[in-house]
Image (cartoon, rainbow, N blue to C red):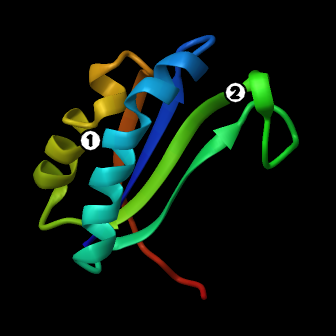
Amino acid sequence: MLYAIISQDVKDSLEKRKIARPEHVARLNQLKDEGRLILAGPHPAVDNQDPGDAGFTGSLVVAEFEDLKAAQSWADSDPYVKAGVYSSFVVKTFNKVLP
């Protein structure tokens, strides 16, 4: 089943993101290589694809997991969680309708 992991960043998270990003992206690439990643990306803090120093306000990951417990465990282990990038996140079931 698909799950959406929706996160909210702490204020001024950009430097923490930069430090933890390589490990974070490596885990996303593993999901991609396994054919389980639907989409992933950050929410820019300003209306621009490259927000520069404004940074990001959170992230969204939609991926396939065995069940909610597995999705929650994967999210709990995210390097951004360990680095204090996220102030909170929620894991929810997701039904892809389109495209």
The residue that mark 1 highlights is 75
Taking the view exactly as shown, the residue that stands out farthest to the top is 11
Mark 1 Cα shell of 10 Å, populated few (<14), some (14-19), many (≥20): some
- Please give the name of the residue rendered at 77% of the width and 23% of the height, measured from the top-left corner: 54
Give the number of callouts.
2
Locate the C terminus by quadrant.
bottom right
| Residue 8 seen in the current view | yes
Q: In x, y percent, where is residue 17?
A: 49, 27
- Please give the name of the residue rendered at 12% of the width and 67% of the height, measured from the top-left corner: 66
Secondary element under disc 2, as helix, strand or loop, is loop
Mark 2 Cα shell of 10 Å, populated few (<14), some (14-19), many (≥20): many
The residue that mark 2 highlights is 55
Taking the view exactly as shown, the residue that stands out farthest to the right is 47
Q: In x, y percent, where is residue 45?
A: 75, 30
Q: In x, y percent, where is residue 20?
A: 38, 29
- Please give the name of the residue rendered at 14% of the width and 42% of the height, measured from the top-left corner: 73
46 left or right of 35 in image: right
Identify which amino acid the numbered label 1 is placed on.
Ala
Quarter of the rendering containing residue 68: bottom left
Report the front residue among 82 and 7: 82
